[in-house]
Image (tube, rainbow, N blue to C red):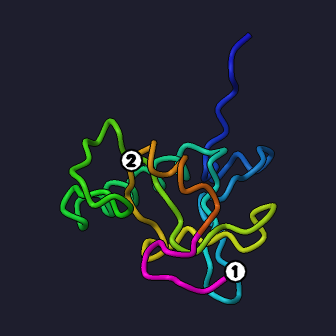
Amino acid sequence: MSDKYIPAFPKPNDLSRKVQVAVKVFPDGREKINHNCKAGRDLYQQRRRIAWEEQGKICAICKKQIRWEDCTTDHVKPRGMGAGKIDDRQENLAAVHIECNIEKGSKRKGYYGIDDL
């Protein structure tokens, strides 16, 4: 059994295949990256690396050095129940330790200078 790869963008003469979009942009500007296609997964990893480098390779939660291997992405503004308010724009992503992200969970109060909720 092999996985069938569906390209993010079909060849011009191959419109019979299902087209998968890497990023969906909502009317309010939020973005949702599609992790079901390679282009989407690559974009999400690229945004994680950008956040990691912009933060000086420091975890946004514990403020300690973070190795790329221990890095994951956290949403500054939470995704919401059922991902109803998902926002994968670069400015909403932070690089954090996997352990810090698990401990934080879906809480946002006290993190990233957000004290509401």
Name the secondary structure under disc 1. loop
**Image height check: is 19 above or below 117?**
above
User: Label 2 crowding class (10 Å Cα cut-off): few <14, some 14-19, many 20+?
Assistant: many
The image quadrant where one finds the N terminus is top right
Q: Main secondary structure of the magenta part?
A: loop
**Image height check: is 77 above or below 104?**
below
Q: Position of residue 38 (x, y in %)?
A: 55, 43
What residue did someone put label 2 on? 97
Identify the magenta region: 108-117
**Image height check: is 103 above or below 84?**
above
Q: Residue at x 79, y 64 (%)?
A: 81
Q: Position of residue 68 (x, y in %)?
A: 28, 42
Mark with earlier residue (2, 1): 1
What residue did someone put label 1 on? 26
Q: Residue at x 72, y 52 (%)?
A: 19
Q: Which label number is shown at residue 68?
A: none
- Distance Cα–Cα, label 2 vs label 1: 29 Å
54 or 38: nearer the viewer: 54
Q: Quadrant of residue 50?
A: bottom left
